[in-house]
Image (cartoon, coloured by chain):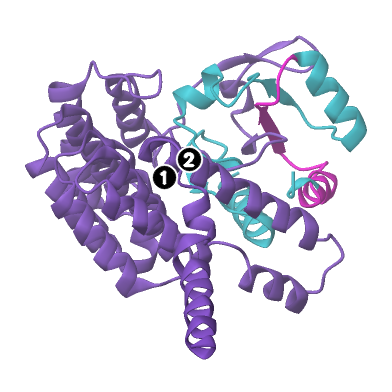
Chain colours: A cyan, B purple
Amino acid sequence: MAMIPHEKALVKRLEKEPFALIGINSDGSVEKLREILKTREINWRQAVDESTEGPLATRWNVSGWPTIYVIDAKGVIRYRDVREAQMDEAVDALLAELKTAK
Amino acid sequence: MNEMIRRAAWLTLVLALAFGLTPTQAQQKGTPAERLEALIERVHTTTNDYYRKNLKKDLTEEERDEVMKHRPGLEFLAEFEALAVEAKGSDVSAKARIEELSIYCDFQKKEDAQKTLDLLLTETMQSKALEDLPPTLVYAYGPMAGADRAKAALQTMLDKSEHKEVKASALFSLATMSCGRRSTAEQKVEGRKYFERLIEEFGDLAPHGRTYRESAEAFLFELDHLQIGMVAPDFESIDENGTKFKLSDYRGKVLVIDFWGNCEAPAWR
């Protein structure tokens, strides 16, 4: 939850870039999640994982929340658990890499 | 004569206050196990009340530090130790000392923590209650005394305990400690061996409703597929609008995935 303001800024800043943020949420049913998204004004896509023992959290062996993965345009995991400024740097570096590759 | 009687009465009163009417004595009802449970409950309530009363939202950093500095904990040590001594060698003794160990670690009392751990691994080495010691070693003792010391204690439990539950719990923690986010490649190789041994020897035990096999396989999946430099394993899910989507739909884009929730408390399983 603490990361939401930063993530909002990131999504806004990069809205025209080949970038996406996906939340994998563990709070409960889709109805409950919709309520949270509305109250918190969260507009990025969510995977409904329903609980901390949901299928994705279990598969990805997540035991602490939040857990962050940053993935490049080829689908390769490049960073883990970067937050705030570190997350910005990671994403910017991968976007720059993508532009040079083109 | 009067003087002597007065003195005797005075002395009796002092002795009564010192030995007879202390709170510990007053609470000595029930079996040691019941008293331990009540004590643990009291620690929880006292701690929660303290934070609720003192940890206000608009505190400055200094004020917050001050609140943290005076948090409850140390004042319960004597009662835990009294129970540990009274029930020497038993499960109750082991449980009481595990509580002591967490408190000592919480307050960074290294030497006392060391002594308590040494007692746990001598007086109560064959207690089944040591099953609950590994998480304290990983999350409290290790960060304070160093990972190597925590690992040494876990190794002792694995080698010496006659209870498979204790051995398995120690082995699981040895494995997870070797596979942390900051572990070296070498440590991860070691971690993989621990997990493989866990599956082989204790795979069917299920301490918290989940078998060690399932837990170990999840960690092995992480080692094999979720490391930096690996292609993220694809998944399919349903979004907040009920639309199905796949991770691989996002190829060509830089992607952040954030496992999050309202209850963002760390959890160990």
Name the spot of residue A14 as percent of width and height, x first.
Answer: 79, 46
Residue sitting at the far front:
B1
In the image, what residue occupies the spot 35% across and 51% down?
Answer: B83
Label 1 with label 2: CB-CB less than 8 Å:
yes
Residue B182 appears in the rendering: no
Residue B53 appears in the rendering: yes
Q: How many marks?
A: 2
Residue kind at label 1, given as amino acid type: Ile
Chain under disc 2? A
Crowding around mark 1 (Cα neighbors within 10 Å: few <14, some 14 to 19, many 20+) is some
Number of the label disc, if any, that sits on residue B228: 1
The residue singled out by tag 2 in the image is A77
In the image, what residue occupies the spot 48% across and 63% down?
Answer: B106
Looking at the picture, tell me which residue is in the foreground, B152 or B264.
B152
Looking at the picture, tell me which residue is in the foreground, B75 or B70.
B75
Tell me: residue B126, above or below residue A79. above
